[in-house]
Amino acid sequence: MAKRKVNNSELLALLAETENNNDKKITTEVMSIDESERNEEGNSSAKRPNLPPLTGEAIRDKKGVKQGQKIPIPRNRIKPLKDNWMSIYTPIVEQLKLQIMYDTKTSHVQVRTSKETTDALAVQRASDFVRAFALGFEVGDALALVRIDELYVETFKITDIKMLKGDHLARAIGRVAGTGGKNKHTIENATRTRIVMADQTLSVLGSFQNVKTARRTICAQVMGTPNSKIHGTLKGISDRMNDRM
């Protein structure tokens, strides 16, 4: 049987017809996929439950126990805790609507929700407040963590900046504190933060940017930067902050 030769025009026509058929198939498949996705979205929206926010007694875990936290209190902060107990107790109970108690056996402060609790973040705010007081901050400074959301506490050690031992570590601590705490107060006033020094551990309370500036200044002092240069830099930072305000 003799084979028939195909002309170029016929070959081009066959290719064009094949491409048209493929395009129609792809278009049909895409349309079917879009329609199925729309149906799935409609079904999911219809099945989505509308749950009310949790308040009061509804804030519970699977075991039915109220949410709470335990904050350890160091031995050197037990007496200040007893002396300032009412100043700590009042904002947690009256403002945050929580329950609080001090366990003398384990030396922990326990905070948990109550029937009147409406804020889901109340336990975390109270925990940050008590933990800041345990680190050594005054009650008035630590209370800012309850009232202002942008504040937090950052804790680090001088040995995290530079590995020092013996007299070198003592001199670095002295450079950060200054004579009579002068350097520490200068950093606090310029960066609008609060700093607590406990041996080689430093805790800084403030907003993110202010804590970052205070930490950089402390790092410069530990590394041996002269106080005159540091105070000049802090003065410039303080002026820029005042201009923003």
Image (tube, rainbow, N blue to C red):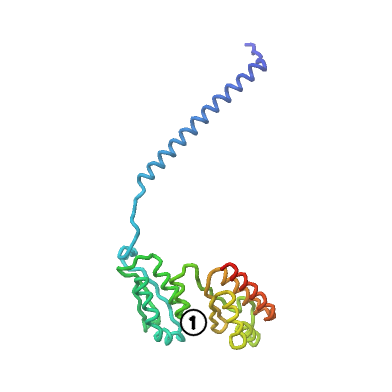
Q: In this view, does 232 lie to the left or right of 156?
A: right
- Mark 1 neighbour density, 10 Å: few (under 14) some (14–19) many (20 or more): some
- Residue plotted at (36% across, 77% down): 90
Q: Is residue 214 left or right of residue 83?
A: right
- Residue plotted at (58% across, 85% down): 181
Residue in front for this viewpoint, 169 or 118: 118
Q: Say above or below: 162 vs 23.
A: below
- Residue plotted at (63% across, 75% down): 217
Residue 25, given in percent of the width and then of the height, sits at 51, 28
Considering every residue shown, the one lying at the far top of the view is 1
In the rendered image, which residue does mark 1 sit on?
136
Please, what is the three-letter code of the amino acid marked with disc 1? Gly
What is the secondary structure assignment of the residue under circle 1? loop
- Quarter of image, res 82: bottom left
- Quarter of image, res 176: bottom right
Residue 101, given in percent of the width and then of the height, sits at 35, 78
Residue in front for this viewpoint, 93 or 155: 93
- Quarter of image, res 200: bottom right
The quadrant the N terminus occupies is: top right
Count of numbered circles in the view: 1
The quadrant the C terminus occupies is: bottom right
Residue in front for this viewpoint, 150 or 39: 150
Q: Say above or below: 95 vs 36.
A: below
Residue 31, given in percent of the width and then of the height, sits at 47, 33
Residue 191, given in percent of the width and then of the height, sits at 58, 74
Q: Say above or below: 153 vs 174.
A: above
